Image: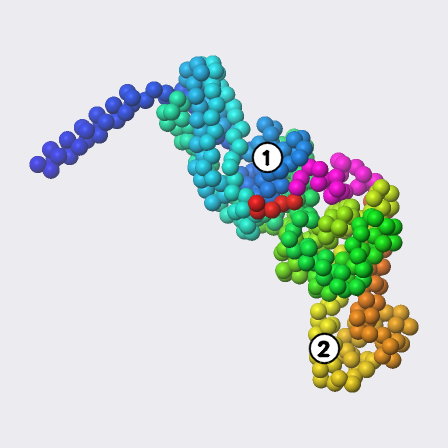
Amino acid sequence: MRKLLFIFAVVLTLVGCQQHSRSRTYSPALVDFQVSYNSLFESRLYPSLLLGSAQLSDPNYALNDTNALFSISVTAPVSNAVLRLSIDSTNLNYVTIFQEVLPVKGVRYTFYPTVKWKYDKLYRTRQQGNTDFTFTCFINDEEVDVKNVRLNYRSANECLLSVRDKTGHNHDFRWMFAGYVNEEHPYIDSILNSILQQGVVSSITGYQKNAATVISQVEAIWYYALEHGITYSSISCTSNPSTITNVQHIRFFDEVYNSRQANCIDACVFFASIMRKIGLKPVIFVEPCHAYLGYYTDKNRKQLKLLETTITSWVDFPALTRNYNETMAANPDATGRARISEAMNAKYYRYLTEDQQHRWENNTLTFDQFKRAVAHYLFQKATEYDQATYTTNKANFANPDIMQYQTLDIEVLRKVVHPISGN
């Protein structure tokens, strides 16, 4: 009895398969549906590229037929066939439907579908992982074939700078840097309020006055960074094993603000974001293994000043303030050197003039004035620090073919790419 039931089940399965085969109008072999991921990106998906290109103002920089991520190709089984492509949802994208008409039977067509990305998820991606994209091909509403593509997605902090193709040509994505500069970040309004309360400047005027006023505003931002305790943290390496891509780990504005840590690129992005907010024109100069900031002191972009942002890590104002408060709490009558521990004095005294040291020891220089004097010395040092290397490498910065030296003019690049956000 069991043997008869088994034979009956096999017969029903074979009949069903034959009927299904007879009911199929379009053969998968004839349609030959294929899905490809751009070999330039080596099966890697860069959220930074998707976020940065989401609102590109210049179509010359957009992902197009030349550098599109996905391409699909089909052969029209009949004239005027309607192709419908469905891309399943993943943790990074919504269900995406793409539809086109295939006019001529037997002709092979290639398309570059635009995926509906989950930009908020892309923005929050801080660790690499893998995901599978499923593509289903329909012809005249009949499912013909299914293809799967597995990709390794990277962290949104991994900024793609350039990719070298098989011919040795470098595809330039340096414009992506400007996406990390975010003058629209909501934290900046409260930062500007804190800057005004510091008293280094009485107002934020951008280029409305003169160069000296512009420099004072930048120094006020500098003083804020010292008071906030932003220190140097060398995190630039990524787990990306590619030998043809040039990437840079960049922290977003709020990550620098919250962690109070920044490498040279992060600090440039942080300062440039605030500068942009008050109407200044920052430029980021990237050399092999280093980056520093520049800014124009006039709206006509004639005079350029430099700023080595990593010098903020030479001091620790929050620790200095705690030390001072603890000393004063323990000994309210303490004056001069006694108001700050000997170790602290030894560290900070070298940033004071002899007159300032004398005034501090004689209690005629307040603690706030003490910090201002230190900050001003370091600001001057940061202004001069990169001048020699900038002068030496000026020709390299001006040469667009030398990828190791990059001049990232944020005002110019802002015409191309908007600040990266999760919206």
Which image quadrant is residue 343 in? bottom right
How far apart are the two marked residues, 1 and 2, measured between alpha carbons?
57 Å
Which residue is pictured at 87% across the width and 54% down the height? 212
The amino acid beneath tag 1 is Leu
Residue 97 pos. (x, y %) = 46, 31
Residue at the right extreme?
355
Which residue is pictured at 83% across the width and 63% down the height? 376
Q: Answer yes or no: is residue 171 visible.
A: no
Q: Secondary structure at mark 2?
A: helix
The residue beneath circle 1 is 40
The residue beneath circle 2 is 325
Which image quadrant is residue 106 in? top left
Q: Is residue 391 left or right of residue 122?
A: right
User: Alpha-carbon neighbours of circle 1 within 10 Å: few (<14), some, or many (≥20)?
Assistant: some
Q: Secondary structure at mark 1?
A: helix
Image quarter (top left, top right, bottom left or bottom right) of the C terminus: top right
User: Alpha-carbon neighbours of circle 2 within 10 Å: few (<14), some, or many (≥20)?
Assistant: some
Is 17 placed above or below 383 here? above
Residue 122 pos. (x, y %) = 54, 45
Residue at the left extreme?
1
Was residue 406 drawn as part of the magenta stretch in this picture? Answer: yes
Q: Which residues are magenta?
A: 394-418
- Between discs 1 and 2, the one toward the N terminus: 1
In front here: 18 or 213? 213
Q: Answer yes or no: is residue 99 visible.
A: yes
Q: Is residue 305 left or right of residue 140?
A: right
Q: Is residue 212 left or right of residue 233?
A: right
The amino acid beneath tag 2 is Asn
